[in-house]
Amino acid sequence: MSHEVKLLRLRETGDSAVALDCWREAQWQSVAIDEDFAQAFGGADQLPPVAATDADAVPAESGVELAFEAGERAVLLLPGSWVWNGLETVPRAARRQSQAVGYMVEEQLAEDVEDLHFTCEAVNGDLCSVMAVGSLKLATLKAQIERLGWPVTAAIPEYRLLASLEQGSGVWLEPSWAHFWDARGRGLSVQRPLAGVVAESLLEVTDASEQAPEEGGDEVASVAPEGRATLSLLGDATELELATLQQLGEVQVLEKAPEALFLEHLKPSVPGNLLSGAYQVTLQSDEGPWWKKPAIAVVACFVLQLTFFIGAGIYYKVQASNADKQARALFGEIFPGDSASADLRRQITGYLNQASGGGGEFAGQLEQLSGVWGSGNSGGLKLQSLRFDGGRGELVLQLRAANLGQLDSAVNKLGQGQYRAELLAANELENGVSGRIRLR
């Protein structure tokens, strides 16, 4: 995973500003940052920065340009002096509640619990490694990362680099700082001159000898232990510092850089990540946030469905309008003396009800007339007018046909039902013939 992750480091410059480094080619290289980022942490209420060395005095504006490839992520190292770390027994139910964890370690803190953000990581049963960092610093860091669009997924204190050591406890010495990691799950960063003072109090000590009473006597004999604790040392130590560490256990000097060891053992989930809860960074990309594509798909489906419904509505509205026009035209042909109302269905229903009250002749005659058009030989026939006499129970209609033979055939078909058809008159036209027929 190391080839997909950049290791960045935030360091104090001694003038209420910060600088940013990137681990490249087995060394830290200064990164060019803008003034807003460099001065963003100046107002945070934290420990005062150590005086900058010559190596640290790099202008914020100078350095290499920080660029990320697609899918690349970054882990940011925070100054160890920003983050308090201790051990505390925390029930499983309270580990994800930052303030609840804070009140459990409140007596060990120099700052108000309300001003700190806490993370909790189990190391042995309910015994947890608790870290606390200023909420203002984390909020500022989150805002700057999101402003710059950096894919920083985790932020850990500097001494957490030593947590990946297989030997357990470790010490990392730099020109200005000393970083300690206790195998039990706690770490600390102090200024280099204080390294010897805090080493013995922080790291787990294995005594060089143990006292055991001899059998049958009161004298105490010295019993040599089977082995001593191994303490990993990274960096150049003075003779005095080396002697102090050798009193705590067997010192194993590692030539490899702690940054390289950390990247070798890096996992997708970084232990001790401070960017959690409300301070988790929302990753940005050229494609936008993760929900952008699903949202586009949902909107596209909605637009397509809406377009379909609108198109279907327009289509059926046009079809209904055409059907209404045809119905009104047919109504005008059947009832030339009446004008169609807005509710044509209701008007025709009224006519049918009237016909039903007069004995049902009108409905039966219309049904017999419809049989002529249903016979399949109605091409050229056109109904010109229709008149019903309720008193006599007869229907007189005017038909137009292509020729006299077709008109005579229509009369014969009309007379094959319950009612008798009679051709009253026939007139020859330029484009056919017109005949008046009585059905009773």
Image (cartoon, rainbow, N blue to C red):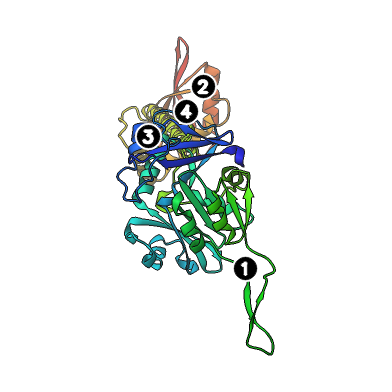
Which residue is the site of mark 1? 208
Percent of width and height locating residue 295? 46, 39
Q: Which of 172/320 is in front?
A: 172
Dot 2, crowdedness within 10 Å: few (<14), some or many (≥20)?
many
Residue plotted at (37% across, 65% down): 106
Q: Amino acid at mark 1?
A: Ala
Residue at image location 36% in from the left, 30% down from the top: 335
For marks 4 and 3, the one nearer the N-term is 4
Q: Earlier in the sequence, mark 2 or mark 1?
A: 1
Of the pair 294 and 428, the residue shown nearer to us: 294
Figure check: 183 above or below 20: below
Locate the C terminus and report the quarter of the image it occupies.
top left
The residue closer to the viewer here, 169 or 194, is 194
Pinpoint residue 183: horizontal percent, then vertical percent. 57, 60
Quadrant assignment, res 430: top left
Disc 1 residue crowd, few under 14, some 14–19, many 20+, Cα 10 Å = some
Tell me residue 389's x, y (percent): 36, 35
Q: Tell me if 202 is positioned left or right of 387 in this view.
A: right
Q: Give the number of callouts.
A: 4
Which-is-in-front pick, marks 4 and 1?
1
- 10 Å neighbourhood of mark 4: few (<14), some, or many (≥20)? few
- Determine the CA span between mark 3 and mark 1: 129 Å
Horizontally, is 332 left or right of 429 in the view?
left
In the image, residue 277 sits, relative to residue 349, either above or below, namely below
